[in-house]
Image (cartoon, helix red, strand yellow):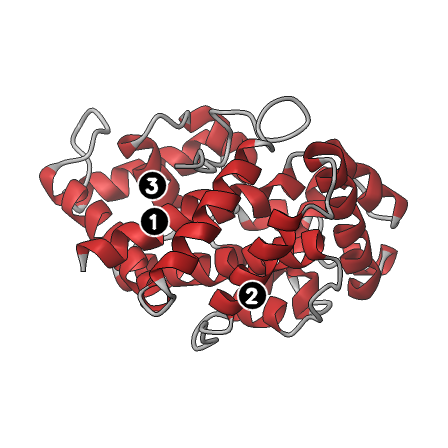
Amino acid sequence: MDEQISAARRAWTVFEPVHAVVYFAPEARSHFDAAGLKGGWMGYFASRSAAMGPVAAAVVVATFHNFQPAMVERAIPDAWSFATPERVLEARYAAVDAILRRMWGDVSAADIGEAAELAAQATQLLQPDGRPLYAAHAALQTPSEPHLALWHACTLLREHRFDGHVAMLTGYGVSGLESLVLATAQSHLDPAMLRRFRGWTEDEWNAAVASLQQRGLLDTAGALTDAGSRLHAAVEMRTDDLAATIWNRVDPQARERLHTILRRRAMQLEGEGGIAYPNPIGVPRPA
């Protein structure tokens, strides 16, 4: 079990940055603006949810899990009056194409094509049960160009894991806001920055802190109690456990080869114009 979980977590540290670069690089904003969307957050909410169709704000709130509803409602459903989901998806892939060409250089390199094939093989083992974001993106056509096919596969792996993580949080009775509070208590993430990037007010944040304290998960100083640490560890372990199912079925040599390529390519996405560490949403550094 430990080996499976380790493989799942190691995989997450390399496919997550490849997927997430679309939220950080400047090309994304310019392509979404050109598609008619208004502002960076509208581009984010619309581009990530477009695979589900012109959904209501409530669907985005539920599936994205930890955004203040009013923040989402400022972008959705208005986004669909400016651009159809199909147009938004075109802009999203055009942005990824521009980002990876700038940051990876020769996107026809043999290792990119090899990684795309290996990642696609892994995604074929994924199941859609209870995973709405993954299922929506899995229904999209796989791009023909290897660098875009690789990004698409990393997106499937990412959203599949994320859906599983939300399921675990829900099962343990942790709301989206409470999950952010617990994350800051466990890690280096800055509460003020997370509030700003997720739209929560200080009063809402403090109310969530008080609720977690009443449950015995945080102490009076806002630090994790033993019970809070156990809950956090249980959620992470079960998230890894769910994700480990496929990695246990992938040939170990193929898994290690994919990890090696993705790690190097993910590290090329670091720095100015890509992902800076630490970052506001806790994207893991390739390990």
The span from disc 2 to disc 1 (Cα, nearest Å) is 18 Å
* Precedes in sequence: disc 2 or disc 1: 1
Would you place residue 143 above or below residue 229 in this image? below
Nearest the camera: 79 or 252? 252
Report the disc number at residue 247.
Answer: none
Query: Marks 2 and 1: which is nearer the front?
Result: 2
* Residue 59 falls left or right of residue 157: right
Residue located beneath label 2 in the image: 120
Residue located beneath label 1 in the image: 9
Residues at badges 2 and 1 in contact (C-beta under 8 Å)?
no
Q: Which residue does the image show at 58% across and 60% down from the upper left? A: 153
* Residue 281 falls left or right of residue 168: right
| Residue farthest left in this picture | 226
* Residue 27 falls left or right of residue 197: right
Q: Secondary structure at mark 1?
A: helix
* Residue 256 falls left or right of residue 48: left
Q: Which residue does the image show at 38% across and 66% down from the upper left? A: 250
Residue located beneath label 3 in the image: 208
